[in-house]
Image: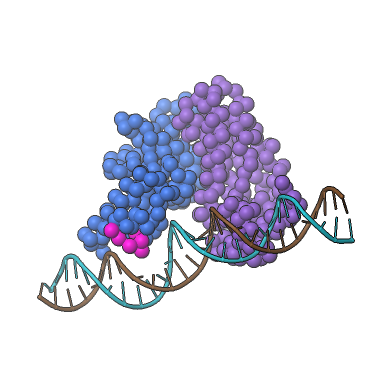
Chain colours: A blue, B purple, C cyan, D brown
Amino acid sequence: MVTPRTLRTRARILDAALDLFERQGYDATTVNQIAEAAGVTPMTFFRHFPTKDAVLVTDPYDPLIAEAVGAQPTGLPPLERTRLGLLAALGDITPTEDSTARRRVALVATSPSLRAAMTISTEATQDAIVERLVADGVDRLDAAISASACLAATTAALLAWGSAPSDVTLARLVRRALAQLAPAGAAS
Amino acid sequence: MVTPRTLRTRARILDAALDLFERQGYDATTVNQIAEAAGVTPMTFFRHFPTKDAVLVTDPYDPLIAEAVGAQPTGLPPLERTRLGLLAALGDITPTEDSTARRRVALVATSPSLRAAMTISTEATQDAIVERLVADGVDRLDAAISASACLAATTAALLAWGSAPSDVTLARLVRRALAQLAPAGAAS
DNA sequence: CGCGCCAATGTTAGTGACTAACATTATGGG
DNA sequence: CCCATAATGTTAGTCACTAACATTGGCGCG
């Protein structure tokens, strides 16, 4: 049941949180402060976001990415399949970026606990890719290695993007990251 | 001041913690339980380990690894330097493994919060590698990409080792992981 | 062999993230 | 305009972790 009221409250909490995080840092900001600034009870905060870090960390792209990886030629080694799949998915994801994406990423880059939360969330994506590769007969360990390496490179690019000049696009950085994992001297 | 008494207490806490974690799971075990089992106050626990997860997560290998990476030929692309450096460092690290290493890794594999803690700790290694590469004139983003990709692959191997048959060595799995990041068709 | 010093431990009191069970408000559909 | 029900509030609690101060216990020295 997604009522308009829910959306408004959620947006107020999110705005208050981003504002406070940017002004006084993530760790120095308490959920109580966020709740108060949003005109709401701490309890209500947790009804909208399961954890404090969930305000900043979300990625609903897992199925999309796993599918893109699966769509790459089965003959390729798993690393290459994953790499190409991520590049292919990139086009679908980038346009969706809302205006706060960069602020969120910049904030995540500032706190170890946030980067840890992001890792946990990335694990879901990794699992999705691994399952997809395993379904095609790839060894589970090989799949995990490929997926985690590609995602780590992508994450490095993402974090860099958070504090990059505003004319640098995320897609550009990710392409650069994944290019380093390409078979020697390959184009694209 | 590293007195014998300190070492004994620390060992008692560590034993109690490993035992409880294995019997009832990491998240279900409280610091109070560990302290009680070790015949000690919760406060004392935190004097020996900064956090609950510190009992399981430690790696003091950063300088060693960074040095090994730096020792690789400067002409190579950063990913390859990092990869070869990690392989070189592997020999120095493996023999040091104490008998609880595998138990610890197996436990880390079971809980997302522990894997997150491990990521934070791996970041230190990553930073050491990045600084070393940057010192040789490598672009910082390129360095971060290489280091994080190689370490992610290594971590995947490490986690797999935790629940692998006991005749499978860590070095073997790590070599397999890093081999996937090798330039196409290169040996070892 | 006992005594005093200081590291190691204990005590108390508190904060902040989160949870559960139950009470209250308010919104939008009939 | 009213009522069912979603959304919020209240209260009370747990657990990881911290700070300040009090206490104990082991080891070196006389």
State the image coordinates of residue B77 (x, y, percent, origin top left): 52, 25
Left or right: residue D14 compared with residue A94: right
Q: In this view of the protein, can residue A88 be seen by the observer?
A: no
Above or below, comparing residue B40 to residue B144 in the picture: below
Question: Depth check: B151 or B32 in front?
Answer: B32
Q: Residue at x 51, y 38 (%)?
A: B148
Q: Where the C terminus of chain A falls, by quadrant?
A: top left
State the image coordinates of residue B126 (x, y, percent, origin top left): 54, 37
Left or right: residue B76 compared with residue B1: left
Above or below, comparing residue B85 to residue A39 in the picture: above
State the image coordinates of residue B139 (x, y, percent, origin top left): 47, 26
In the picture as drawn, the residue positioned furthest to the top comes out as B75
Above or below, comparing residue C24 to residue A185 in the picture: below
Above or below, comparing residue A153 to residue B98 in the picture: above
Q: In this view of the protein, can residue B92 be seen by the observer?
A: yes
Part of the protein shown in magenta? A39-45
State the image coordinates of residue B95 (x, y, percent, origin top left): 72, 42
Q: Any magenta on residue B98?
A: no
Q: Residue at x 38, y 35 (%)?
A: A163
Question: Depth check: C14 or B101 in front?
Answer: C14
Q: Residue at x 49, y 27 (%)?
A: A184
Left or right: residue B99 compared with residue D14: right
